[in-house]
Image: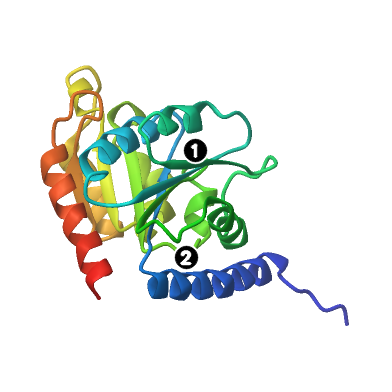
Amino acid sequence: MIQVRDVRVRVLEDNDKIAQELRKDLRTKKVFLVNLMASPGAGKTTTLERMIEALKGEFHIGVMEADTDSVVDAERIEKTGVKTIQLHTGGSCHMDASMTKEGLAELGTDDLDLVFLENVGNLVCPAEFDVGQAMRLMILSVPEGDDKPLKYPLMFQVSDCLLLNKTDAMSVFDFDIDLFKERVHTLNAGMKIYPVSALNGDGFDRWIEDFRKVVRDYLSQ
């Protein structure tokens, strides 16, 4: 009788093992790793620029920019003055734990306590792979629509925090924020949702205050 082995399960199991080892290592080194996930155009890099500006006086920050190609986002982030590295995934639609571990080694974390991984723009694959992060932070932009929790549930289920970006465009799009929150909380009852605008800064004071506390608590343990 032919035996059937689900290779995908094995791949995820192997990835999770590496991710757990990486998470333990980062905890020992007191490095807080954020896995930033969103679709293309949701405003990941603009959000990251605003967060760096608010936090770089308090934390030593590094950024890993993951894309299938180009250095466009890395060049933008480098201008903020923080340590930056570009990671090319060779066509892969996500980062996994091994790639993240390699990226951290290239970036160097001895002088860092806060690292952002800007994952490949995608609402599907990045949600499936643990990269050893301390926080999964997702961004959804208003133009994408309030139905995305129905179409891409896993991303909402595994994320720790959600930034609802481009709220400055709320009046232009048919986006029901109450319905959106209901859909999200059906998938993830504990998800904190922060309506923000990376363009003009609306909502960022509350988000930065809460994020800062999470990082401080982690580093103090």
Secondary structure beneath dot 1 equals loop
Residue 147 vs residue 65, the one in the foreground: 65
Q: Please report the residue visible at 17 percent of the width from the left and 46 percent of the height from the top.
A: 207
Q: Earlier in the sequence, mark 2 or mark 1?
A: 1
> Is residue 114 found left or right of 202 in the rendered image?
right
Residue 108 vs residue 212, the one in the foreground: 108
Residue 107 at x, y percent in the picture = 53, 51
**What amino acid is labelled 2 in the image?**
Gly
Q: Please report the residue visible at 28 percent of the width from the left and 30 percent of the height from the top.
A: 142
Residue 179 at x, y percent in the picture = 20, 42
In the figure, residue 147 lies in which quadrant? top left
- The residue singled out by tag 2 in the image is 132
Q: Which mark is residue 207?
A: none
Tell me if residue 53 comes above or below residue 154 in the rendering.
above
- The residue singled out by tag 1 in the image is 121
**Local crowd size for mark 1, using a 10 Å CA cut-off: few (<14), some (14–19), many (≥20):** many
**What amino acid is labelled 1 in the image?**
Gly
> Is residue 200 found left or right of 94 in the rendered image?
left
Distance from the alpha carbon under mark 2 to that under mark 1 = 19 Å
